[in-house]
């Protein structure tokens, strides 16, 4: 029976591929995944970052005719900070980038990213691919290999055909432009339905400082940084140590507060590069007013990108903020928020527009945080649903049902035990999530 089932599955997959090919030939195929209903209306206009240039290419890493490689070249004197997935099975590129982070050098730097193949769980071959790509980029751009960061995203467990990537480097190095960051955002997509970008301009010491970032992420999203691929560029003058401190704190307030499916990726990272091309004064102490101003602006860009990842959650139709207050500590508030945000029962109730607040109660109870049933209250948006351990006298089921029809929802919980607070952001869990991941390797 097992062999018959496998054969039937192969036949079904072949039929689907033939139908897709016929649709392409007939001109009736959908050229891209259906864009998430929660997507922004348009890709934002990003500020140009002096000292950072970008280029993209079609390498055919997994699919023909798809832009799947991006190269970023950073001017001499640039500093790089980052955070990385804590997965015990993280990919070779992640381990390599972690080892290179914080290396002081007067040289520039480069970042090369491919989509379609994660180069994860590929043994020694994975490390050899990273070395080959970094070495080739080093030669083309006249950089030390220690200043070349690589990343890969896509299918796990398949050897990366790195020679297809290195074959594009002549074209990439000759096509580098400061205004090509939006193209780079498209090149790093996998199951994303739209490219993600965010930017900001802030004044430091009377001079403008520009920040622009891109991200990819749609599934396998859970907070244990990085949870996706994120690349942010700024012309700020800042030391590597100060930038790393600001990035780490910003990560905890943004990317480490989102979840789509509670799964932590093997391959993901966040890198922030500062070229120092701005005329603004140097930031070397994280406690300075200039550092706080810059950190606030960078955190805003990070949070914007993090929210976009949730809005593009595989199959998502609802964007949900979980806001917890009154916990014994911030850590307890976070436990409650993430327990609610990760609960399949909560997420499927949201998908079905069912105001099943009992599932929120369940998630609070299993979170491990200190809780008192007779103190906590629950809100759906502005509507008080439960109060002091029971349904609120003012609440009616039709009120909750009407609220759940909104695309953007807030689930509020007041533990009434202390001053701890936290927020998390998630999406609903729909049939489309299953369809996407059941066919991911087809």
Image (tube, helix red, strand yellow):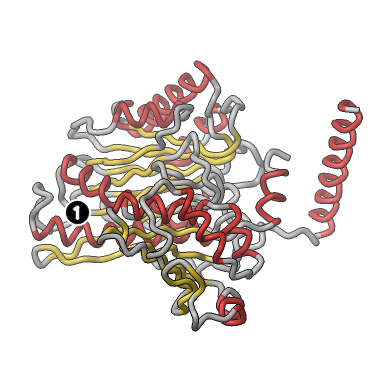
The answer to which image quadrant residue 156 occupies is top right
Quarter of the figure with the C terminus: top right
Q: Position of residue 350 (x, y in %)?
A: 59, 65
Residue 135, horizontal then vertical, whole percent: 39, 24
| Residue located beneath label 1 in the image | 236
* Secondary structure found at label 1: loop
Q: Nearer the viewer, residue 172 or 387?
A: 387
Residue 316 occupies quadrant: bottom right
Other residues around mark 1 within 10 Å, as few (<14) / some (14–19) / many (≥20)? many
Relative height, residue 41 to residue 361 (above, below)? below
Between 55 and 337, the one nearer to me in the picture:
337
Side of 165 relative to 52 (left or right): right
In the figure, residue 348 lies in which quadrant?
bottom right
Residue 68 in the image: above or below residue 303: above
In percent of the image, x 19 and y 58: which residue is there?
Answer: 294
User: Which residue sits at x=42%, y=42%?
Assistant: 71
In the picture shown, does residue 389 fall above or below 114? Answer: below
Q: Position of residue 231 (x, y in %)?
A: 38, 48
In the rendered structure, the answer to whether residue 49 lies left or right of residue 423 reads: left
């Amino acid at each position: 029976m097992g062999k018959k089932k496998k054969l039937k599955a192969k036949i079904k997959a072949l039929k689907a591929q033939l139908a897709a090919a016929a649709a392409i030939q007939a001109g009736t195929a959908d050229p891209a995944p259906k864009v998430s209903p929660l997507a922004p209306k348009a890709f934002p206009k990003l500020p140009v970052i002096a000292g950072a240039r970008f280029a993209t290419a079609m390498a055919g890493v997994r699919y023909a005719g798809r832009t799947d490689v991006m190269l970023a070249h950073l001017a001499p004197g640039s500093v790089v900070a980052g955070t990385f997935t804590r997965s015990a099975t993280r990919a070779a590129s992640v381990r390599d980038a972690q080892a290179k982070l914080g290396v002081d050098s007067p040289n520039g730097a480069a970042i090369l990213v491919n989509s379609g193949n994660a180069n994860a769980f590929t043994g020694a071959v994975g490390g050899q691919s990273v070395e080959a790509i970094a070495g080739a980029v080093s030669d083309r751009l006249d950089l030390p290999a220690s200043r070349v960061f690589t990343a890969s995203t896509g299918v796990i467990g398949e050897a990366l055909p790195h020679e297809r990537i290195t074959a594009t480097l002549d074209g990439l190095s000759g096509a580098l432009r400061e205004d090509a960051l939006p193209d780079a955002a498209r090149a790093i997509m996998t199951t994303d339905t739209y490219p993600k970008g965010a930017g900001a301009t802030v004044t430091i010491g009377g001079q403008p400082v520009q920040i622009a970032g891109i991200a990819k992420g749609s599934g396998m999203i859970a907070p244990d940084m990085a949870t996706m691929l994120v690349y942010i560029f700024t012309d700020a003058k800042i030391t590597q140590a100060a930038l790393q401190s600001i990035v780490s704190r910003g990560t905890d307030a943004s990317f480490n507060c989102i979840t789509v499916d509670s799964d932590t990726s093997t391959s993901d990272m966040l890198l922030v590069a500062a070229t120092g091309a701005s005329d603004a004064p140097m930031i070397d102490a994280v406690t300075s007013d200039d550092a706080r101003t810059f950190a606030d602006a960078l955190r805003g860009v990070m949070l914007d990108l993090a929210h976009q990842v949730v809005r593009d959650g595989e199959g998502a139709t609802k964007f949900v903020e979980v806001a917890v207050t009154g916990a014994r500590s911030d850590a307890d508030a976070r436990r409650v928020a993430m327990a609610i945000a990760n609960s399949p029962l909560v997420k499927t109730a949201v998908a079905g527009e069912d105001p099943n607040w009992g599932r929120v109660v369940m998630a609070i109870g299993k979170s491990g945080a200190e809780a008192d049933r007779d103190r906590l209250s629950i809100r759906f948006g502005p509507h008080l649903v439960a109060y002091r351990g029971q349904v609120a006298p003012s609440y009616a089921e039709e009120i909750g049902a009407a609220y759940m029809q909104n695309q953007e929802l807030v689930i509020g919980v007041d533990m009434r035990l202390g001053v701890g607070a936290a927020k998390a952001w998630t999406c609903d869990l729909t049939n489309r999530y299953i369809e996407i991941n059941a066919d991911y390797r087809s």
